[in-house]
Amino acid sequence: MEQTDAVSGTPGAGVDGGERTSRKAATALKLVAAVDSSEESLHALSWALDNIVRCHPDATLVVVHAQHAVDHFAYPVAAHGINILPSCKSTAAESMRKAQEENSRRIVARALDICKERQVGATGTVVEGDAKEAICQAVERMHAGLLVLGSRGLGRIKRAFLGSVSDYLIHHACCPVLVVRPRPTK
């Protein structure tokens, strides 16, 4: 599943004509910001807007959110061998899918609102799958020049057991990755 929304108003992104526009597009930075529902990811987006996009007004910004596939979730009763009518399974899956899509729309809309507040044009998209792999594939497909994401600041032990999206992307993404650390707590 891929869904796209756009926000207009990029400073310096006027319409030139013909060859100049295509040359500009070929050299412009394509920045992808991965967001989720965490404040850390929105902090990373804000940091990128203030420190990267401001210096590269012709940059293209894409906000990406990864949503788990509905079949990723197990139905607890199915594991116990209880027969469930196929219509009930599809209704439950469809209900879960709609809830996920609405949640993803809210996350992307919140990120795009941050861009709009700073008068930066951006496009939002939702990709489906495990966040690590889905973001990695999206960045490659989009030919990104830079991936920006936040870090939740997990300790070594939690990161070893839970895995880290940022660690995975640092090692597997096809472009440079900038991980923005969380704000210091007081």
Image: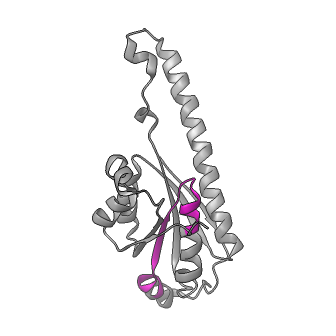
Residue reaching furthest to the left: 171
Residue 49 lies in the magenta stretch: no
Residue found at the far front of this picture: 186
* Residue shown at the point (63%, 79%) measured from the top left: 10
- Quick check: 85 above or below 132? above
Q: Give the left or right position of residue 28, taking residue 81 as reference.
A: right
Give the residue drawn at x 54%, y 24%: 92
State which region is magenta.
Answer: 24-43
Residue 45 lies in quadrant: bottom right
Q: How many circles with numbers are drawn on the protein?
A: 0
Q: Nearer the viewer, residue 136 or 168?
A: 168
Q: Is 143 on the left-hand or right-hand side of 153?
A: left
Query: Residue 166's spot in the image, x, y percent?
Result: 39, 61
Tell me where residue 114 sits by quadrant: bottom right
Q: Is 30 in the magenta?
A: yes
Whether 44 is drawn above or below 94: the answer is below
